[in-house]
Image (cartoon, rainbow, N blue to C red):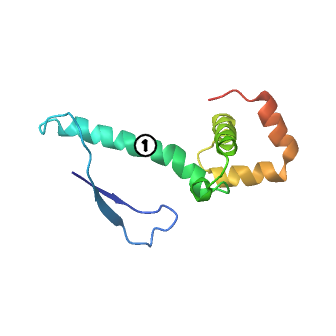
Amino acid sequence: MVERTWSIKNKPEEQEKSHIRFFLSSLNADQGPQAAKAVRGHWMVENANHYKRDTCQWREDDHRHRRINVAQNLALTRNALLAIIPFGDEQNLRTLLDKYHRNPGEAIQLILHARPI
């Protein structure tokens, strides 16, 4: 059993939230640090990837496509963009998408000359 506590970074005045998650593992009870590392690794993927996709203009979790090819093509395109967009320390995906929307020439240059990170 793992209790997870979090707060939204852009709303520090908001009260911390908490919930309990249950994880199944083949680890013994005395291997707590390894279990904690595995749980953090799970949330690292969520925070680094899926959260970006859902909080920007893409709002990926809100879309329900009837045709599977549409959903797969959008996911592929988004994966490619996330691989080439250069994220800075203070930049989030929403800000960068706005920047490239306002500067289509720069977006084309990014696509033509970028190397996946």
In percent of width and height, residue 104 lies at 85, 46
Answer left or right for 35 relative to 52: left
**Which quadrant of the view contains residue 109?**
top right
Q: Residue at x 47, y 48 (%)?
A: 47
Note whether 1 is above or below 75 in the view shown.
below
Note whether 113 is above or below 59 in the view shown.
above
Answer left or right for 79 relative to 110: left
In percent of width and height, residue 29 lies at 12, 39
> What is the secondary structure assignment of the residue under circle 1?
helix
Note whether 107 is above or below 18 in the view shown.
above
In percent of width and height, residue 23 lies at 26, 46
Q: Residue at x 11, y 37 (%)?
A: 30
Name the foreground residue: 68 vs 55.
68
Q: Residue at x 18, y 40 (%)?
A: 32
**Which quadrant of the view contains residue 64?**
bottom right
Q: Residue at x 70, y 44 (%)?
A: 70
Name the foreground residue: 58 vs 15.
58
What's under tag 1, amino acid-wise? Met
Q: Which residue is labeled 1 in the image?
A: 44
Image quarter in which the C terminus is found = top right
Name the foreground residue: 100 vs 68.
68
Note whether 77 is above or below 54 in the view shown.
above
In percent of width and height, residue 25 lies at 23, 38
Answer left or right for 17 relative to 61: left
